[in-house]
Image (tube, rainbow, N blue to C red):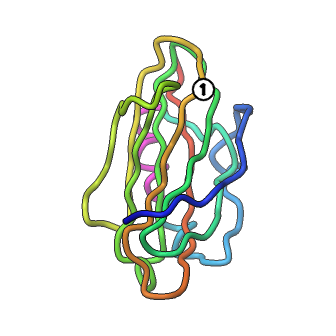
Amino acid sequence: MLKRIVAPLITSIGLLSLNASVALSADGNITASLVGQALALSALNYKAALKAYYDVLPGNTYTFIKYNLTRGYNYNMIASCDDNECQDLDLLLLDRDGNEIDSDKGNSTNAKVGLLVRESDTYQLVVIMRGCRKISCEYGVQLLYQEK
């Protein structure tokens, strides 16, 4: 059974360049993975919308991160955890009413979900730490948007 962990609310989308968006993490593997995923998406004109968000979760727990997203933009949320400690990280993207929009439930330490926002609104990203070899594992999440 998964247990919920409360995370802070992220309320604004400040558009930043990719280089300015990558904060240093306690774990360079997570940052490197996020940068690699973001660079792959940059070929499709995706740019970082916020600095990467880092936190820790115990195994078999989840947390919500809320984003206010703007109509007309494509967004991708990418996540990574340290593959030396983390066994599986999943993402669910939910609308305001809790309906699933997209998910990545693969058995991997990286995950990606996305959507084209048809109406500006608050969306919830559920970060699920399925397995962790330690008491808790660090993860990072990066929000990217596609230029029009």
Instruction: Using the image, determine if residue 40 lies above or below residue 147.
Output: below
Query: At 53% from the left edge and 37% from the top edge, which residue is drawn?
Result: 124
Residue 3 is inside the magenta segment: no
What x and y, as percent, mark residue 66?
A: 62, 38
Q: Is 126 on the left or on the right of 88, as rendered? A: right
What x and y, as percent, mark residue 59?
A: 45, 75
Q: Is 145 on the left or on the right of 107, as rendered? A: right
Query: In front: 80, or 103?
Result: 103
Query: In front: 62, or 115?
Result: 62
| Secondary structure state at the residue bearing disc 1 | strand
Residue 42 is inside the magenta segment: yes
Instruction: Using the image, determine if residue 103 lies above or below residue 79.
Output: above
Which residue lies most toward the left here?
Answer: 106
Provide the major secondary structure of the magenta segment: helix
Query: At 43% from the left edge and 38% from the top edge, which residue is drawn?
Result: 93
Q: Is residue 128 visible?
A: yes
What x and y, as percent, mark residue 35?
A: 53, 58
Disc 1 marks a residue whose amino acid type is: Thr
Query: At 52% from the left edge and 11% from the top edge, which residue is drawn?
Result: 119
Instruction: Using the image, determine if residue 136 lies above or below residue 50.
Output: below
Q: Quadrant of residue 99?
A: top left
What x and y, as percent, mark residue 9?
A: 71, 43
Query: In front: 91, or 140?
Result: 91
Total labels: the figure holds 1
Q: Quadrant of residue 94?
A: top left
Which residue lies most toward the front here?
Answer: 1
Q: Which residues are magenta?
A: 36-45
Q: Which residue bears the numbered disc 1? A: 122
